Image (spheres, grey):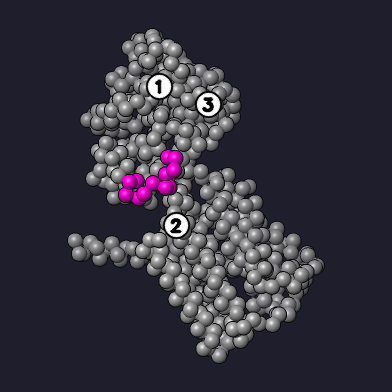
Amino acid sequence: MSRSSIRFWIGAALFLTAVVLMTQLIRNEYPFFAGYVILQFIVLAVAWSILGGYAGYVNFGTSAFFGVGVYTAVFLFKATGAPLAVQIAAAAIVGALLGFAVGLVTLRMQGIYFSIATIAMTIIIETTVTNWRYVGGAAGIQLQRPPVMPPFDTYVQMLFFVQALLVVLTVAIARYMQISWMGRGLQALKDDELAAECTGVPTLRLKVTACVISGALMCAAGAPAAMYLQYAEPSSAFNLNYSVSVLAMSLIGGTAHWIGPVLGAILLGTTQQLLTVSISSEVNVLVLGVMLVLFVVVAPEGIIGLIRKAGRKRAGDRA
Amino acid sequence: MMPPGGPDRAPVLRISALTKRFGGFIALDNVSVDIHPGERFGLIGPNGSGKTTLINCISGAFRTEAGTVVFAGEDITPLAPHIRTRRGIARSFQIPRPFKSMTVAENLMVALDFASVGGDFIPAAQRRDTVMSILTQMGLASKADLSTLGLSQVELRKMELARAMATHPKLLISDEAMAGLSSSEVDEVLDLLIKLAGQGITIIMIEHIMQAVMRFSERVMCLDAGKIIAIGAPAEVMANQRVQEAYLGT
């Protein structure tokens, strides 16, 4: 294992230890309630950037993948009472299949066709679920949480931990993709698809693979949301806000490195939580918009771009 | 004229009855030609005559309506471009298409990662050596770790040839690698191509600069309106009346 890999896994272990310690030490429920949302956005943003960042194919269908994750969990829970782990695993499989289908159909074409198709997909799936009686239809469905498993005191604490595990899994996959041959191939096809093909890069296969992995992770991130809210309803599970927020988080963080969407999600997610508590949830959207415009103008390559620029400047000063 | 290597050697590339249409426009009309191993082949013709279309059909960027492309004995007509690259067909582009977010060395690394067999299992240091030896050959060693955005026009052309070379091609197609270069730069690139041909690589060169074509080519083919109007020794083709008419428009 390389030195940076060792550092990464030590960091991941420390992160998970801190999460477990939090669940044992903090009695107040609220930090977990808010923290869960931030972790969920980290998974979504990092997963989004696997296709949107590395390959440059903008997915407007985050909410579709998220909502499909939610409803896979709802369906399994209602039909079989499946445990949380099974709900998440099944959501990942469904997400992978959905990613494969959308990818195969639209990624043959270059440019914005994929983005348009993902918007259409969101509308189609939401409409379908809205008319699906078994999972509650438009009125939504109430869910009774099963008893919590030790060592956790409350279900929300457990979900917080589960989402933290998903963060580690997602970042590990995104990081692997970035530093491996796959990352170089995706970067090449993002720069120039024809030149990449003519240099031996199997562009379609790489794009579809990225779409499958990205879709699986986004669905997995959505699965625990049903239990988190104890309620699922199409217009919130498929809310366009997920797509917009995740896109903004990835772009504000910067997509050249996996840490970008992590930073973006923490920054925006925390801001949103603070605003929701202090002012109102409606102001969120406004702040999101303003921050996105600000970053597009001032730092088009996001926080990562700013850090790299500062690093180059320091190196330049030293020379 | 006998092709180099004698008449009984199998062609490395055999194009048979190739036709390519864009809507009602026939860009290539029943084109057939054999290219022999190690040959230096010049491809000329006025603008819009179908030269780049032919290259795109050979490298797989375009699907053809009719005809076949056989490379090293294998029918590659249905294969995607990246598989053709792995079989040994490399190309440069008329307008350079570098991977602009990468350094020069990284551009070549893409080729090593994807086009060479077992590329991922070669140790990093050895891969770097391979990249550097290609860049040295191309006179780009000092630019290895620069962004492609900082390269001059001639350096971009060389970078594209270097990236093509990193795929270990049997056939290299150079699409106007000298367009827009000064005469000393033209000589530089031409010397590079002749050196590569000396290593046994078959080269198809598209070019408008006639001195370069004459100096480089063992055989020249002239296209006009998607048809072959002349093929043979460079001097013969240049003297051909239809070639002169096509170029001068009389």
Q: In this view, does B186 lie above or below A259?
A: above
Residue A58, visible in the rendered structure: yes
Residue plotted at (56% across, 57% down): A213
Quadrant position of the C terminus of chain B in the picture: top left
Residue plotted at (64% across, 68% down): A88
Residue B117 falls within the magenta-colored stretch: yes
Identify which residue, A95 or B65, lies in the foreground.
Answer: A95
Gap in Å between the C-alphas at discs 2 and 1? 39 Å
Instruction: Give percent across and percent down for residue A278.
Output: 53, 85
Chain letter of the residue carrying label 2: A
The residue under label 2 is which amino acid type?
Answer: Gln
Q: Residue B74 carries which label?
A: 3
Please state the extent of the stretch shown in magenta in the rendering: B115-127
Helix, strand or loop under label 1: loop
Q: Name the residue under label 2.
A: A178
Q: In this view, does A203 lie above or below A151?
A: above
Left or right: A4 as drawn, with respect to A78: left
Instruction: Give percent across and percent down for residue B169.
Output: 40, 32
Residue furthest bottom in the image: A27
Q: Is residue A166 above or below residue B191?
A: below
The residue under label 1 is which amino acid type?
Answer: Pro
The residue under label 3 is which amino acid type?
Answer: Glu
How busy is the neighbourhood of tag 1: few (under 14 within 10 Å), some, or many (20 plus)?
Answer: many
Residue A156 falls within the magenta-colored stretch: no
Q: Which of marks 2 and 3 is in front?
A: 3
Identify which residue, B179 or B7, lies in the foreground.
Answer: B7
Q: Residue B170: which quarter of the image?
A: top left
Residue plotted at (59% across, 83% down): A151
Helix, strand or loop under label 2: helix
Q: Nearer the viewer, mark 2 or mark 1?
A: 1
